Image (cartoon, coloured by chain):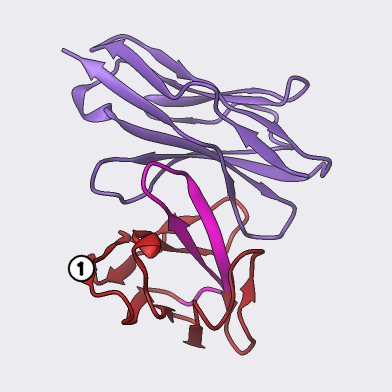
Chain colours: A red, B purple
Amino acid sequence: SAVISQKPSRDICQRGTSLTIQCQVDSQVTMMFWYRQQPGQSLTLIATANQGSEATYESGFVIDKFPISRPNLTFSTLTVSNMSPEDSSIYLCSVSDKNTEAFFGQGTRLTVV
Amino acid sequence: AQKITQTQPGMFVQEKEAVTLDCTYDTSDPSYGLFWYKQPSSGEMIFLIYQGSYDQQNATEGRYSLNFQKARKSANLVISASQLGDSAMYFCAMREGQGGKLIFGQGTELSVKP
């Protein structure tokens, strides 16, 4: 199974600022995903990040708010831009290289004040 | 459209007893996979078990087993011999075809009583 290192594990940020979350995998993977989990809610996919192409965003999520980079097959970043308290959530990256697998990083618990 | 439903917001179980967490799904794709995850209060998502739509046998992983009823479109998680450390949120998820992304249910909060 892939080992995923995600950081920061938590942060408290001022509204109007941006935070970049990093996701590092110990092996090369084709597909990486970014999810958001709002307080008391389930996980919702933000976007799919494939190396060498633009990220594919789900309905309700836009690149200007959640820019994503995928410079190689082991690394990705998600930026939460111009934050507001409504962005307070857990953000999780996930990788999958086999249909039978889907592993997650430890998550980033973001609080916007 | 694909959908995952977990109808039990919260469940209680006595330590050492077995518990079943319900999950039903809806999809028109004949090829799909079903996943269960445990999320403790720390927030990480811990993979528990996987069942493919074409798998003939129900999946098992240690104390976890998946009761896969394909005709009923249900994929219930059975935890045997519950432990205090099993107290957490549990999420059922589905992946259609080769798409990669997961759709999650609303989760069930399991509390194990000593």
B8 in the magenta segment: no
Query: Is A30 on the left-hand or right-hand side of A86?
Result: right
Q: Is residue B99 above or below residue B102?
A: below
Which of A87 and A90 lies nearest the eye of the viewer? A87
| Quarter containing the N terminus of chain A | bottom left
| Quarter containing the C terminus of chain A | bottom left
Which residue: 50% across, 82% down?
A: A67
Q: Point out the residue furthest to the left here.
A: B114
Q: For the residue marked with disc 1, what is the amino acid?
A: Ile
Which residue: 48% across, 21% down?
A: B8
Which residue: 65% across, 43% down?
A: B33
Q: Residues in magenta? A: A28-48
Residue A11 visible somewhere in the drawing: yes
Which residue: 28% across, 21% down?
A: B111
Residue A72 visible somewhere in the drawing: no
Residue A19: percent from the left, percent from the top? 32, 79
Q: Chain of mark 1?
A: A
Q: Is residue A99 above or below residue A87?
A: above
Residue B31: percent from the left, percent from the top? 77, 45
Which of B32 and B27 lies nearest the eye of the viewer? B27
Query: Is B67 on the left-hand or right-hand side of B3?
Result: left
Residue B91: percent from the left, percent from the top? 47, 37
Q: Is residue B93 above or below residue A17?
A: above
Judging by the rendered image, the residue that carries numbered circle 1 is: A12
Residue count near mark 1 (Cα–Cα under 10 Å), binned few <14, some 14–19, many ≥20: few
Residue A29: percent from the left, percent from the top? 52, 73
Report the magenta stretch's main SS. strand
